[in-house]
């Protein structure tokens, strides 16, 4: 058995015209799809964890409002601590 016919058969591709043809484009498009899917999964994970909003997920909105009032000077420290204790006891 000669090696020459086997090599010739492996190189046969009538639609490639001597180069890769659609195979290269298909591989690039396939990797682009994989990249888009991975980026979408990362984006969904980040959004679900609340990282974009500064990690506010799971925090009590009443405590946030109390902190804002204290920061604006609407209430003094004693009132802030008392109300915070009341909120955390419920």
Image (cartoon, rainbow, N blue to C red):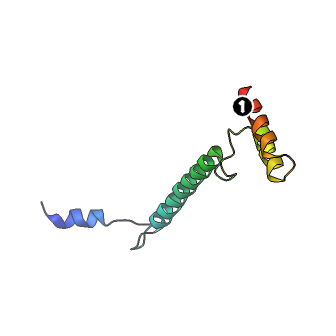
Mark 1 Cα-neighbour bin, 10 Å: few <14, some 14–19, many ≥20: few
In front here: 61 or 78?
78
In the depicted structure, whether residue 84 falls above or below residue 33 = above
Q: Where does the image place residue 3, in percent across and percent down from the top left? A: 16, 64
> Quadrant of the rendered structure where residue 8 is?
bottom left
Q: Residue at x 72, y 27 (%)?
A: 89
Furthest-left residue in this view: 1
Question: Which quadrant: the C terminus?
Answer: top right
Q: Where does the image place residue 31, in percent across and percent down from the top left? A: 49, 59
Furthest-right residue in this view: 74
Q: Residue at x 68, y 38 (%)?
A: 58
Q: Where does the image place residue 48, in percent across and percent down from the top left? A: 64, 44
In front here: 33 or 5?
33
Q: Residue at x 77, y 35 (%)?
A: 82
Q: Where does the image place residue 29, in percent across and percent down from the top left? A: 53, 61
Judging by the rendered image, the residue that carries numbered circle 1 is 88
**33 sits to left or right of 59:** left
Question: Which quadrant: the N terminus?
Answer: bottom left
């Amino acid at each position: 058995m000669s090696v020459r016919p086997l090599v010739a058969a492996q190189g046969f591709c009538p639609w490639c015209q001597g180069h890769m043809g659609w195979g290269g484009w298909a591989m690039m498009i396939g990797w682009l799809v994989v990249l888009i899917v991975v980026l979408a999964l990362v984006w969904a994970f980040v959004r679900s964890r609340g990282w974009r909003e500064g990690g506010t997920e799971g925090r009590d909105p009443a405590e946030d409002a109390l902190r804002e009032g204290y920061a604006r000077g609407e209430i003094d420290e004693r009132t802030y601590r008392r109300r915070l204790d009341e909120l955390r006891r419920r």
